[in-house]
Amino acid sequence: MSNYGKNENSQTISPWSKNILMSAKMSGFEIIEKRVKYIHSPNNKFGFEKKCDFDVEMAVDLIKERNNYDTIILFSGDGDLMCAIKYLKEEYNKICIVFGARGHIGREVFDMKSEGIIQDVLFADDFEYRLNMDRFRQ
């Protein structure tokens, strides 16, 4: 359980998410985790908000590891990453495909797709039936 205030009872990671991560590991993906920090927020009913700020670390890793991949499959719609993605496309001809949640993808991502920096934008809900098939097999 997360320590997110007296009324918070959500799990840090759900069993379904654990299964997705385990499947990714078994498929050869490297999973990088980061602890979530809690920021005081009087407007939140719990008094805190979860914040990860993973985008900077991802951008640095994408640039540092550029010789170890050809294609980026970015499971984030964060527009803050587009500066690094554009740099990697222009300087190293890296291909990038963004996979995110409809309605939660930054305008910058679509701008980069229009400019040819992003090859494609895929929406998680378009694949929901496949995720549900795996979920209900258990």
Image (tube, rainbow, N blue to C red):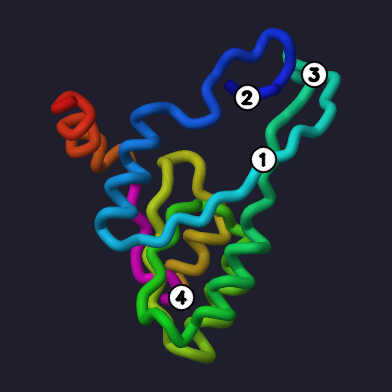
Q: Is residue 119 magenta?
A: yes
For the residues marked 2 and 4, what is the alpha-carbon distance in whole angstroms? 38 Å
Q: Are marks 1 and 2 in contact (CB under 8 Å)?
A: yes
Residue type marked 3: Gly
Pick whichever, 67 or 42, lies toward us: 67
Residue type marked 1: Val
Q: Which badge, 3 or 2, comes first in the chain's sequence?
A: 2
Q: Which residue is mark 2?
A: 2
Closer to us: mark 1 or mark 3?
1
Element marked by disc 2: loop
For the residues marked 1 and 2, what is the alpha-carbon distance in whole angstroms? 10 Å
Element marked by disc 1: loop
Instruction: Return the x and y of residue 33 as percentages of the image width and height.
Output: 55, 50
Residue type marked 2: Ser
Closer to us: mark 3 or mark 4?
3
Quarter of the image for residue 116 reads bottom left
Q: Is residue 125 above or below residue 72?
A: above
Q: Which of the image's four quarters has the C terminus?
A: top left
Pick whichever, 81 or 138, lies toward us: 138
**Total marks placed:** 4
Q: Which residue is mark 1?
A: 36
Element marked by disc 4: loop
Tell me the crowding category of disc 3: few under 14, some 14 to 19, or many 20 or more residues within 10 angstroms, Cα based: some
Magenta region: which residues? 116-123
Residue type marked 4: Ile
Closer to us: mark 2 or mark 4?
2
Element marked by disc 3: loop
Tell me the crowding category of disc 2: few under 14, some 14 to 19, or many 20 or more residues within 10 angstroms, Cα based: few
Q: Is residue 52 above or below residue 132?
A: below
Instruction: Tell me what residue is drawn at x 43 percent, y 67 percent.
Output: 113
